[in-house]
Amino acid sequence: MQLKIYNSLSGEKEVFKPILEGNIGMYVCGPTVYSNVHLGNVRTFLSFDFIYRSLQFLGYKVRYVRNITDAGHLTDDGDINNDRFIKQSRLEKLEPMEIVQKYTVDFHEVLKKFNLLPPTIEPTATGHIIEQLELAKDLIEKGFAYESNGSVYFDVLEYNARGLNYGELSRRNIEELFANTRDLDGQFEKKNPQDFALWKKASPEHIMKWPSPWGEGFPGWHLECTAMSTKYLGDQFDIHGGGMDLKFPHHECEIAQGKACNGVEPVKYWMHANMLTMNGQRMSKTTGNFILPVQLMSGNNDFFEKAFHPSVLRFCFLQAHYRSVLDISNDAMLASEKGFNRLMEAVKILNTQVPTEGVETSSFDYKNWKEKVLEALSDDFNSPILISHLFEAVKFISASKLGKESISTNDYEDLKQFLNAIVFDVLGLETIEESNNDKLDQTLQVLIDLRNQARKSKNWELSDQIRDQLLEKGIELKDGREGTTYQLL
Ligand code: AMP
Ligand code: ZN
């Protein structure tokens, strides 16, 4: 079956042909580690985790590079004294590299909870300063960049004058860009407002800075991805991914840097994952419209009526195609939880059921069904269609448990193996094993809720009774500003 991928560069679904038969080089822009990742960030990384898993399942050997941006990321106002890491380090009274460490650890822990596989290489921007300096020097030598007041800028007009096409990914033309840019950053240093920084001069107070031929400074954000992707995957590689919001200017600039340096399109297939929205608006740190993974898992938030297991969120995300906008809601999560439980129950039945001997024909056409599942996967990783096919099998398996249907004995083992592979290896779902601790937690929560109700209706006798009897059993309830918690004595 041919794998088709929607290529943002051509705007079309294309038959995928790797540069080197059987092998794939894939680069995905990683997080800027100056704060906790929110569920929106998780969606993008999870989309590419699903794609990575699918490529491996389809038989490819994948070198998967996802970077960590740990330097030189300016805030939106472009003020060089407002590097995000430095701003956050002032706020938290930590060294910038402590900020980097703290949020890198958080990022890894969160992705592990959602069962994302680690990339095969995870390079950091600060670990590749030399490579970025080399690129900037090369671009100056080739006439595509210029130094100005200790900073180095990419010359967009020169790039276009040489017949290269700035704006090819985001389909913006240069005249339009010139008319619409109001970029105050470096306005007195740049030849043109569209020129973007490859290297920025650091002020004396700036903490994260490195020596360069142009004085002390720090690298531009776009340059780090070109430096790390080409170092590990070559001047031209198969797949580059990231969130839709990175298409312009970040990915457009990466294309320009790559083509100017190496004379080839750096990437064969550009893939962009769409946004997670909440209340119809993009989930984002800056607007405050966000939920953190820990809030979802603990239920400690005003948005969801209960806590959800990370695998349920994973399932919810995969019920939408990676190129569609997904609006998260309490109802969507409840529906996903139902679907997730049905799917997992069917897998459990299939894995434990003893097949009926001697059934030769069955109304479930396994081979045809398997084709359809693989077709969905190969059609630009269409997870919602794939999941809808899975539910055809779920229906059948549930009916077989009731003795209403039988699975052909010949297909039984194949179905079991294939369904397990799709559910656990490709979709990356995990069964929810309830530990005794979880059950104790839930039971105590019921008692805490009952006690709160009693207190609300001023039934002090009942509320004290609940508290005292629990204390007798060695469980102390503590009332605090965040609500009631318990402690085992
Ligand atoms: P950042 O750390 O800001 O560079 O973001 C890390 C990744 O999360 C990028 O690929 C962004 O495109 C992605 N991202 C940010 N907000 C959202 C959102 N609301 N939905 C999906 N992806 C997002
Ligand atoms: Zn990037």
Image (cartoon, grey):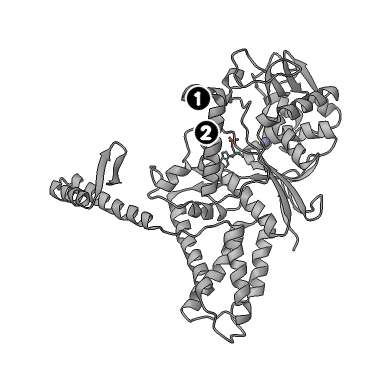
- Residue 433 is left or right of residue 455, and the answer is right
Q: Residues within 10 Å of mark 1 (few under 14, many from 20)?
A: some
Q: Which residue is mark 2?
A: 102
- Residue 302 is left or right of residue 242, and the answer is left
Report x, y in % for residue 103: 53, 35
474 or 211, which is in the foreground? 474
Callout 2 amino acid:
Lys
Callout 1 amino acid:
Leu
- Residue 190 is left or right of residue 298, and the answer is right
Q: Residue placed farthest to the bottom in the image?
A: 358
- Disc nearer the start of the sequence (2/1): 1
280 or 437, which is in the foreground? 437
Q: Which mark is residue 154?
A: none
Location of residue 384 by image quarter: bottom right
- Distance of mark 2 from mark 1, alpha carbons? 10 Å
Q: Which residue is mark 1?
A: 94
